[in-house]
Image (spheres, rainbow, N blue to C red):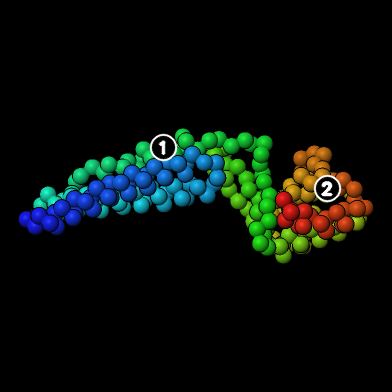
Amino acid sequence: MENVKVKQILKEASTSLDQVKVALFDASRECVKTEAGNEWDVAKTLFSLAENADSLNRQIKSLVNGSETKAVVTEVEPRINAAQFREEASERVPRKRKEDYPKYEVRGDRLVKIGLGRDKRTEYEHEIAKGEFDKILARLTSIAASQKQFTVDQVQEGLDCPVYQTYALIAVLAKMGLLTNPRRGTYRFTTPGTFSSAASTVWERLQSK
């Protein structure tokens, strides 16, 4: 490139892009240090933006140096190593405590179960819509009126919701002390006579957390 003024403008742009790339990369690293599950998605987005800034910067430098942009993009080794970043990110995310899970919260018209992944770092979620929640609870209330204990298969009779939703709600009720699990596969109502009235307040209690 022969135009001195344009070359100077591009050099200044390149310097700015270097600063932007470093800032984005540092921000991405900070995100992976936090324990919040949604920060990993932010970290990946910031990292991708840093890569884009780096790529653009290399293309600008190729113009300043009079090189072919295409050659630079395909042949120059990226200064940001994606594989290394992912490895470092995985190591930086602290392990979570198994005893803190599962967690439950109400988001709008859905009950969300937040579980802990096998790596003890990532989380997963299962949702139960309010309509399904009410159906499962009504089925349990009906069972409580005639028997003290039950199995999940008995609850599923007449329900068309996925069984994982039934298990999730039963786990919530057990955590609240309304059910016990005396042996594998069998659940017992703590106080069958008052289960109906207690169960009617479960959604509100979850909302208030």
Picture quarter containing residue 36?
top right
Q: Check disc 2 and give the amino acid type.
A: Leu
Q: Label 2 belongs to which residue?
A: 178
Between the residue at mark 2 and the residue at mark 1, the CA separation in whole angstroms equals: 44 Å
Q: Secondary structure at mark 2?
A: loop
Instruction: Give the residue pinned by disc 1.
Output: 87
| Foreground pick, 174 / 146 | 174
> Dividing the picture into quarters, in which one does residue 198 lie?
bottom right
Asked whether the residues under the numbered discs 2 and 1 touch, taking CB atoms below 8 Å apart as contact, a structural biologist would say no
Task: Look at 67% across and 36% down and name the residue there.
Answer: 99
Residue 171: x and y in percent read 74, 47
Q: Secondary structure at mark 1?
A: helix
Q: Seen in the image, is 29 located left or right of residue 11?
A: right
Residue visible at 68% across and 52% down?
Answer: 105
Q: Nearer the viewer, residue 94 or 7?
A: 7
Question: Counting residues from the N terminus, which is met first, the one under dot 2 or under dot 1?
Answer: 1
Which residue corresponds to the image point at 68% horizontal and 63% vertical from the top-left? 109
| Residue 99 in view of the camera | yes
Residue 146 lies, in percent from the top left, at 91, 55
Front residue of 55/182: it is 55
Q: Residue at x 55, y 35 (%)?
A: 95
Badge 1 amino acid: Glu
Q: Position of residue 20 (x, y in %)?
A: 32, 49
Q: Is residue 114 left or right of residue 9?
A: right
Inspect this view and state whether residue 162 appears: no
Question: In the rendered image of this protein, does residue 175 appear above or below residue 202?
Answer: above
Could you say where residue 174 lies in the image, as x and y percent from the top left?
A: 78, 45
Decide if residue 44 is on the left or right side of residue 140.
left
Q: Which mark is residue 155?
A: none
